[in-house]
């Protein structure tokens, strides 16, 4: 707030009754502010607020929302460090090539589709990021992970084309990545483009939870000394419609709790989703602001472009700000399609003071005045503040126009999301607006445009990326292989026991021993969603600690017991609370740490099997797309021992679902020795041989004697079937009916028990497998 001008923006319009009192209060605040530092001013306001609350004046809304304007005032806006005019030229070329990619795919008649409008709205913010912020890994910097909106992928490809990372042929085969000469996946997809995309983002909502837990995992690795604490941000760009997904708002609390200042979430608020407005009757930016502020994030709004600054400066009574606060997103969307005179009419209706204020703008100015998301200066200021924020995550709410630059039929229309074809005149209009120096015929054919390598544009673009350490987005696997685990971890299980134990108990024993292994123990990461006691893992609390970025600032109630609840800054266990989506995201982060951080962590995520595939199946699919490694372990599986808990806990089908994930190997071992063989081989394949696979294992809580590993059975166990026992060898094997009984998991107990019964019913030969 400047010293000479009061911010009256939140003050209502009733000049009648008590404007003098308001002015007095503002004057005193101003005087106080002049004499004290910010913390004192904050304290004073808090005292006032507490007093109001105590005396029955609720103020929640006022504290969670700020006026509908940019968070960063003009006086705090840094000078723009780049060549804006040149950057605009580069952006225009990217806009054209992204558009051309989709148009060529359409023209080819292949019917592969594509999206233009999303990138059109996001281009400026992404370009500011690429030119000034997204930094790569280096000796002294951890490297950024950049996740973009899936439907904006053509824009990222277009930039990579200029950079020389992708060929024209690649672009021509957009959405046809299996074409022999190479192509591009529709959406960010590491498995399809393993050196390009860091994370899959096509399933809306999952990139947010993935990014939050990746940022948190980076801190976990740093706190455990497995990764240097030398920076690296996770940037996640999502749509405003996407924020409806429960994985987005459902996981933001953890980001604040864990103080993830290495996380920057950018919401592209173009006010539209696929079908129409996101919040026609209110304002998505204000709604998200209150939710994120409530979750204690640093919230930065970028709403208005620079041309509005001068109007704000003249808006001494807050008349324009009030109108901005009042108009709903449905109105703003309408303004994006109406001619300037009609916008003026609607905007200033019955408001002569506002009409007077807006007089300096022509109708054409009013039609074309920019939203903040298309103004690099405003975006730069916001990104700059975000990267320099410490102690909390930042969300940027950036207002844009969907289909920006697509011409009258594209911008702001409810059909724009699906628009993948454009008429000749629309193509010409867009290309000319972007100053693309191609002939009319080339433009009609939607040909790509790439300036010469020695042009100003190309040199600038390359130089900016070189200064930021290389190209983005990127996925680079530089991770050492691990030696095979010491066999001692598996010995007990391989030898078997007469004593009745469950496969769950054996798993925990193997896990405990693996964590003691000198060379690989520190890489093992047990993950539990508030079920450690259920699986008998509570002893691990004391042994390796539960990770907490704050350590343990209280004495646990069971401090004097042999197995106290121990939280520690370098704790190894990830206790996720009752949040399977979050636990899966931790599994994903731990299982892809080899690619993101060069650290080969080995996650074992143990959960009630019923809350795995059917609850968070899409996250498991994302693990497959991410080439995640590690062990998913469905506990209390099967239908034998949880009858008391009702059918809801009876899992007879998670393996059916598991089989749908191509790079997931699923096993339902019956005996501890089988479990040991599978885990030992899995660790070898994933961490010594670095194969891109992961595992789903089911374990049971039924106790029974565990046989020793039979000689020669390993290969069969790993292939999924082997002969466990043959019927009495002494019986003649000619002309006699044979029965083969098959089983896995704890049902093997039933498979084995009828052997004698069946034989007594005169079935002379029988084998079980
Ligand atoms: C889980 C999921 N549901 C639905 C879709 C289909 N879908 C793709 S984009 C989109 C609209 C996106 O709107 P928004 O997030 O506002 O992004 P914008 O394109 O407006 O930037 C929808 C519904 C999807 N990709 N993932
Ligand atoms: Mg949108």
Image (spheres, helix red, strand yellow):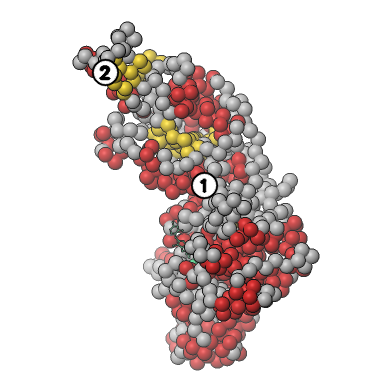
Q: Which label's residue is closer to the chain start, 1 or 2?
A: 1
Horizontal side of 181 relative to 566 (left or right) equals: right
Q: What residue is shown with label 1?
A: 625
Mark 1 to mark 2 CA distance (whole Å): 47 Å
Residue at 44% x, 48% y: name it.
618
Tag 1: Cα neighbours inside 10 Å, few (<14), some, or many (≥20)? many
Residue 727 in percent (x, y) is at 32, 14
The foreground one among 261 and 468 is 468
Quarter holding residue 608: top left
The image shows residue 607 at horizontal and vertical percentages of 41, 38
> Residue 378 or 650: which is nearer the viewer?
650
Q: Is mark 1 on a helix, strand or loop?
A: helix
Q: Classify residue 595 as left or right of residue 106.
A: right
Query: Image quadrant of residue 405?
Result: bottom right
Q: Which residue is drawn at 73% across and 67% down?
A: 451
Quadrant of the frame with the C terminus: top left
Q: Where is residue 584 in the image (x, y as percent from the top left)?
A: 47, 44
Q: Residue furthest front?
A: 735
Residue 496 seen by the camera: yes
Viewer-nearest of discs 1 and 2: 2
Dot label at residue 575: none
Residue at label 2?
A: 737
Q: Which residue lies furthest to the top in this view?
A: 730
Above or below — where is 637 with respect to 673?
Answer: below
Secondary element at image label 2 = loop
Above or below, comparing residue 291 to residue 500 in the picture:
below
């Amino acid at each position: 707030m400047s010293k000479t001008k009061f911010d009256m923006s939140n003050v209502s319009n009733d000049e009648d009754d008590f404007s003098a009192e308001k002015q007095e209060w503002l004057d005193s605040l101003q005087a106080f502010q002049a004499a004290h530092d910010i913390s004192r001013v904050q304290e004073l306001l808090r005292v006032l607020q507490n007093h109001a609350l105590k005396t029955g004046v609720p103020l929640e809304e006022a504290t969670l929302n700020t006026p509908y304007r940019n968070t960063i005032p003009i006086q705090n806006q840094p000078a723009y460090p780049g060549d804006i005019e040149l950057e605009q030229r580069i952006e225009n070329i990217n806009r054209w090539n992204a558009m051309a990619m989709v148009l060529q795919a359409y023209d080819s008649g292949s019917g592969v589709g594509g999206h233009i409008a999303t990138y059109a709205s996001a281009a400026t913010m992404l370009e500011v990021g690429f030119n000034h912020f997204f930094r790569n890994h280096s000796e002294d910097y951890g490297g950024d992970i950049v996740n973009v909106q899936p439907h904006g992928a053509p824009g990222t490809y277009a930039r990579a084309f200029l950079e020389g990372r992708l060929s024209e042929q690649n672009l021509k085969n957009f959405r046809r990545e299996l074409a022999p000469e190479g192509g591009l996946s529709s959406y960010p997809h590491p498995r399809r483009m393993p050196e390009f995309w860091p994370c899959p983002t096509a399933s809306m909502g999952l990139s947010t939870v993935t990014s939050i837990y990746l940022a948190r995992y980076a801190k976990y690795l740093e706190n455990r000394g497995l990764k240097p604490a030398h920076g690296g941000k996770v940037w996640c760009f999502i749509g405003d419609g996407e924020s409806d997904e429960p994985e987005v708002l459902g996981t933001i609390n953890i980001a604040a709790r864990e103080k993830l200042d290495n996380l920057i979430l950018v919401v592209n608020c173009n006010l539209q989703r696929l079908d129409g407005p996101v919040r026609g009757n209110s304002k998505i930016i204000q709604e998200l602001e209150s939710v994120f502020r409530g979750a204690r994030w640093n919230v930065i709004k970028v709403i208005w472009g620079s041309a509005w600054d001068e109007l704000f400066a003249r808006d001494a009574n807050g008349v324009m700000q009030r109108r901005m606060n009042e108009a709903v997103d449905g109105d703003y969307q309408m303004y994006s399609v109406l001619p300037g005179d009609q916008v003026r009419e609607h905007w200033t209706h019955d408001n002569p003071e506002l009409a007077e204020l807006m007089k300096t703008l022509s109708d054409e100015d009013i039609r074309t005045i920019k939203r903040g998301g298309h103004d690099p200066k405003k975006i730069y200021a916001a990104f700059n503040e975000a990267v320099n924020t410490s102690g909390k995550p930042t969300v940027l709410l950036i207002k844009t126009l969907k289909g920006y630059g697509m011409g009258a039929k594209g911008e702001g229309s409810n059909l724009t999301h699906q628009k993948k074809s454009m008429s000749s005149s629309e193509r010409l209009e867009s290309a000319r607006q972007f100053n693309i120096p191609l002939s009319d015929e080339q433009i009609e054919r939607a040909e790509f445009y790439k300036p010469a390598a020695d042009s100003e544009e190309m040199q600038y673009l390359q130089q900016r990326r070189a200064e930021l350490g290389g190209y983005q987005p990127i996925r680079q696997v530089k991770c050492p292989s691990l030696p095979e685990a010491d066999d001692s971890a598996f010995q007990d299980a391989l030898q078997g026991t007469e004593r009745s134990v469950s496969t769950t108990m054996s798993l925990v024993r193997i896990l405990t021993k693996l964590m003691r292994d000198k060379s690989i123990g520190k890489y093992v990461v047990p993950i539990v969603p508030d079920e450690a006691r259920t699986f008998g893992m509570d002893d691990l609390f004391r042994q390796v600690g539960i990770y907490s970025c704050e350590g343990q600032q209280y004495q646990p109630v069971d401090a004097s017991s042999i197995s106290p609840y121990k939280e520690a800054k370098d704790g190894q266990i990830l206790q996720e609370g009752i949040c399977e989506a979050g636990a899966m995201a931790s599994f994903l982060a731990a299982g892809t740490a080899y690619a993101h951080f060069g650290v080969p962590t080995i996650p074992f995520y143990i959960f009630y099997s019923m809350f795995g595939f059917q609850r968070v199946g899409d996250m498991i699919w994302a693990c497959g797309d991410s080439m995640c490694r590690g062990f998913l372990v469905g506990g209390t599986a099967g239908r034998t021992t949880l009858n008391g808990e009702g059918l809801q806990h009876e899992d007879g089908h998670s393996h059916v679902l598991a089989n749908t994930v191509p790079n997931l190997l699923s096993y339902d071992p019956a005996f501890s020795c089988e479990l040991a063989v599978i885990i030992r081989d899995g660790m070898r394949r994933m961490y010594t041989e670095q194969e891109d696979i992961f595992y789903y294992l089911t374990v049971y809580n039924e106790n029974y004697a565990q046989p020793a590993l039979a000689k020669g059975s390993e290969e069969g166990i790993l292939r999924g079937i082997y002969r466990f026992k043959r019927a009495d060898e002494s019986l003649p094997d000619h002309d006699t009916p044979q029965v083969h009984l098959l089983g896995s998991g704890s049902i093997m107990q039933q498979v084995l028990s009828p052997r004698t019964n069946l034989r007594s019913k005169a079935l002379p030969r029988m084998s079980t497998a």
